[in-house]
Amino acid sequence: MVAEILWALGASPISGADTPLLYDKLLALGRERDYQKVEGHASFLGMTGAAGAAVGGGFVAVASLRLTFHVTAIALAVAVLAGFLLREAPRQKGRHPRGELHYLYKIGRFALYKNVEVRWLILLAALINGLGTVSFWLYQPYFELCRIPLHYFGLIFALFNVFAAFSGKIAFAVERVLGKRLSLTSLPVLLAASLFAMAAIVTPLGFLVVLFAQFVRGFSHPVIQDYINRRTWSDKRATVISIKNLTSRIMFVAAAPAIGAAVDRADVRLGLLLAGVGATLGGAALIVALRRDRVI
């Protein structure tokens, strides 16, 4: 419990800080149009690293489970050193005469009420990330249902990370071909298709349909982040991104208990069906709202 609390405290300052730091730096350099490409490449590096860790971590764990914590601590120490090399770009710092809490309230009202495009983008990201996280916790029982041998789990998760990584790396090129409308509408469609296909296909090769969801995972992050960045200012950007991340976690917390109960009462296929229905209905409602407010 102490370790989890410390991990949460360490992760909290990053939430909403890394994306604005990158975007503001590109903005200062006159390269804000390259954000999707740079963010996609950053996601590519992170996910391919996770894929390598999934494979290598299995071999480390065979030697000693405790050794995995030591190796992870070394990697995090390198990240700390890299953090000291960061240089923040000049940006406007927001203040309000009624204090910081009122200023945070004003930004929250801007993100979730006043700016309709940012509001629907945040809710779309919440749907994708929240249900995507729920489905992640269903992968292992789904693999067991498909009778996939346990020693293949690490390789399959590595494949997922590599596929998502390449999806993020090419996101800028795919978005330019598809355009904003198709880029956003395809996200809930592909996620729902993946969940329904998992519920219907129970074979050792069933894990391949999860690749649709991995494309959504890799593609959605740089694309939605870029759209939100373009509609916010530097004094609000970090808080708006934090609100997006918080909303995604609230979506997960809201959906996970019901889907988990369905899995316990029946099996993982019912949980996948419920997640697919949620992606379909939520995605349809958001697409209608995006079109009504002329966001797409």
Image: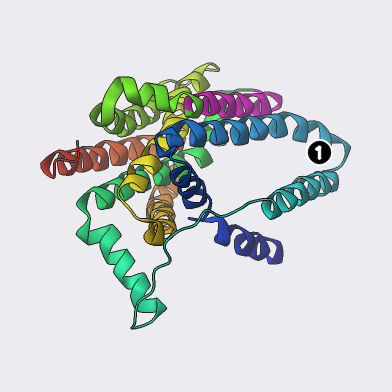
Query: Can residue 262 be seen?
Result: no
Tell me which corner region of the image, top left, top right, bottom left or bottom right, holds residue 54: top right
Image position of 62 (left or right of 36): right
Quadrant into which the C terminus falls: top left
Judge the density around disc 1: few (<14), some (14-19), many (≥20) Cα neighbours within 10 Å.
few
Judge left or right: residue 130 versus residue 159: left
* Residue tagged 1: 61
Determine whether 201 is above or below 15 in the image: above
Image quarter of residue 10: bottom right
Q: Give the secondary structure at mark 1.
A: helix
- Residue at 29% x, 58% y: name it: 111
Q: Main secondary structure of the magenta part?
A: helix
Where residue 49 sits in the image (x, y, percent)? 67, 33
- The answer to whether residue 85 is left or right of residue 161 is right
Q: Is residue 106 above or below residue 43?
A: below
Where residue 2 appears, as percent x and y from the top left, is: 70, 67
Tell me which residue sits at (29%, 33%) in the image.
184
Q: Which one is nearer the viewer's eye here, 203 or 119?
A: 119
Amino acid type indicated by mark 1: Ala
Q: Residue furthest right?
A: 63
Q: How is the image coloured?
A: rainbow
Residue 196 as seen in the image, left or right of residue 145: left
Residue 86 part of the magenta segment: no
Q: How many marks?
A: 1
Residue 228 visible in the picture: yes
Residue 4 is situated, as x and y percent measured from the top left of the image, at 65, 61
Residue that lies at the very extreme toward the left in this rendered image: 292
Q: Residue 239 or 276: which is nearer the viewer? A: 239
Q: Residue at the spot x=55%, y=35% of the render? A: 43
Q: Quadrant of the N terminus?
A: bottom right
Question: Which residue occupies the foreground of this view, 92 or 222?
Answer: 92
Q: Which residues are magenta?
A: 149-167
